Amino acid sequence: MDWKVLLEQAPSGGMTYLGWLWSGLFWTLAVSLCAWVIAFSVGSVVGVARTVPLRVPRAVATAYVELFRNIPLLVQMFLWYFVMPELVPKAWGDWLKQDMPNLLTLPFAAQFSLWEFTAAVLCLGLYTASRVAEQVRSGIQSLSVGQTNAGLAMGLTLPQVYRHVTLPMAYRIVIPPMTSEFLTIFKNSSTALTIGVLELTAQSRQISEYTFKTFEAFTAATLIYIVITMTVIFAMRALESRVAVPGYIAQGGGR
Amino acid sequence: MLEFDWGVIWKYRESLWDGMLTSLQLFAIALAGGIFFGTLLALARLAPWKLVSVPAAGFVNLIRSIPFIMAIFWFYFLTPVIVSKFTGQQGEAVGPFTSAVVAFIMVESAYYSEIVRAGIQSIPRGQPAAAYALGLNYWQSMGHVVLPQAFRNMLPVMLTQAVILFQDTSLVYVVALKDFLGAASKAGQLTGRIVELYIFVAVVFFILCFLASHAVKRLQARLAAGR
Amino acid sequence: MPMIELRNVSKWYGSFQVLDDCTTSVGKGEVVVVCGPSGSGKSTLIKAVNGLEPFQKGEIVVNGVSVGDPKTDLPKLRAHIGMVFQNFELFPHMSITRNLTLGQVKVLGRSQEEAEAKGMKLLDRVGLLSQKDKFPGQLSGGQQQRVAIARALSMDPIAMLFDEPTSALDPEMINEVLDVMVELAREGMTMMVVTHEMGFARKVAHRVVFMDHGQIVEDCTKDEFFGSVRSERAQTFLSKILHH
């Protein structure tokens, strides 16, 4: 075992191999967080739309979920990156493929362009939105109909019922599944390596190809993944207990 | 905008079909292996002996906290090393397909073990208690009382995971194995008709997975009604 | 020598003490009713008798075998002590017949025919022979509990433990279960029964144990208990449950 190899100068980027790993982590986090913003907002809207008593929004939301859930993520990645630029007017497609700025100038220099990054974020975000939507929907539907009825009986409008009664409870219920959705997006971001985004997994493989120290390179990346995962889990547990409703236990203990 | 040429799919139908067969083969082996080892892992995790439960939990948590692709790279790298150590054969004797199969079984068994564990824990504690009260031991109470009920509860989740697994088989693309997506990719490079081929792949996956997940939903409704 | 003997048994959940120095016994052929307010530890106590609830201090000896001893073969011990649960705990994925034969075949090593013959005899005894091919979910609560009693009896137990056997039942079904239990008591079965059914206690109990806050507050004969209850806590409890 030769861990010192990570401190050697890497052939590009003006940094050590360890620097490559940090750069990879940076892009993993950048892709994950940007995609999560899309996933959470689009997913919330779609999830709520699936529960409202109106036919058209419900049908559209259902179609969205079915479409994005039933095509492999990797295939979606290729559709965004390779296929989409060909389906829009040619000038736009050329702009996407050729004229988007290169990211070399940013800190944590990347050898790929903004288009690769954008495609990865769009793909991951819209794919995960379909999963978030399902969590939001099941969170809302796990509340008893009596809750909605009680709200309506007080004279609240349906949007008010969602705003004050249903959603505050539903979002508390879905914190644990949301945590695992975020971790899913974080792990799935490695799929972006197939379209050239040099994120953490890609960097560790690149190190292994340059140095033949595969074990060390993979172990280092694996440890980083574990640390991030643990951090997210602990942070979300803290959030969960901060917003917990006294006397309301989602899962019955039983003796 | 470009002109579509869908004829390219017919032209490459044989290699696409071969790719699909590879995908299905990988899917079937990973599914069977994943469920089998996943059940063992779940039992190990819930066993009252720390020497068994702690390593099992460690393995499952490790696999679940790294990306699927990272796990594929790991086993793609490790399998030949380990095989040559035990058999003395050259590492090259292990083909990419075997390595991919090992990677998928390992990853899926971690995922399935969580499903089985949740299924076992969904059984009210009175059930094993009643089995113990009759004098059954740990394995008998698991085998006759807890697991049969747990598997029935888990069936829809297991099948849903199977649909996800089928989609995940496309990830072997990263080790250049010619599965369905890999075959389409290859044909796309040869002909420049990447748009048609990727759209075709997406449509085929969509139809298969859509039908399968709806069948699972119907089964779930029937199981719920039969209760 | 008593059939079941508890000596100074204590149990904690973390820092919370659920059983506090409990000492009592059940003689052969004796029927002992354990009562007390909810959360008083009576369910925990009865589950400790066949080792379903571990305890930290004291000793429980059943038929000469120490339950807390790590060397004790618990499955073997449990095979001879029948237990009936509050929520019946029939195995929902098995027919009534299989529920009755599982333990006999797997634990006692009886043949399937022998086990079925035994099971059917007991099912007939609790008046449910016609239900033998149904599944637990198709029976009423009272019927399920009677099957559960038959299942426990099929193991030829030397003693029976009842953990609130009627408290999950609708009122009109309570008597069908109590009738079976009364009959069993009159046949001389050794029984330890956690219940609020004071009518049952009056009819067949030899002794009554009253628990509160994990302690055994009263342990006396039926006549003493219902005649002049000594502790104030037991009196309050009795006046509450006898009023409905």
Image: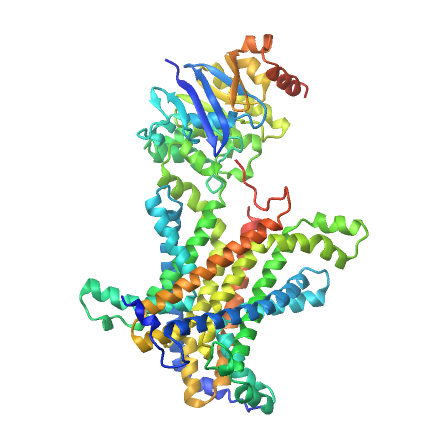
Query: Between residues B11 and A63, which one lies in front from this camera angle?
Result: A63
Q: Position of residue B201 (x, y in %)?
A: 48, 77
Query: Between residues B24 and C198, which one lies in front from this camera angle?
Result: C198
Is A159 on the left-hand or right-hand side of B163? right
Q: Residue at x 48, y 43 (%)?
A: B123
Asked if one can make out residue B177 in the rendered structure from this viewpoint, the answer is no
Is A25 on the left-hand or right-hand side of B175? right
| Quarter of the view holding residue A63 | bottom right
Q: Position of residue B176 (x, y in %)?
A: 36, 77
Q: Position of residue C189 (x, y in %)?
A: 44, 17
Is B83 on the left-hand or right-hand side of B178? left
Q: Residue at x 53, y 56 (%)?
A: A235
Q: Residue at x 56, y 13 (%)?
A: C203
Q: Residue furthest left?
A: B88
Q: Position of residue C40 (x, y in %)?
A: 55, 25
Q: How is the image coloured?
A: rainbow
| Quarter of the view holding residue C168 | top right
Query: Between residues B100 and A105, which one lies in front from this camera angle?
Result: A105
Vertical order, A202 against B162 (above or below): below
Q: Residue at x 44, y 67 (%)?
A: B166
Q: Check the picture and name the quadrant holding the N terminus of chain C.
A: top left
Asked if one can make out residue C148 in the rendered structure from this viewpoint, the answer is yes
| Quarter of the view holding residue A99 | bottom right
Q: Check the picture and name the quadrant holding the C terminus of chain C.
A: top right
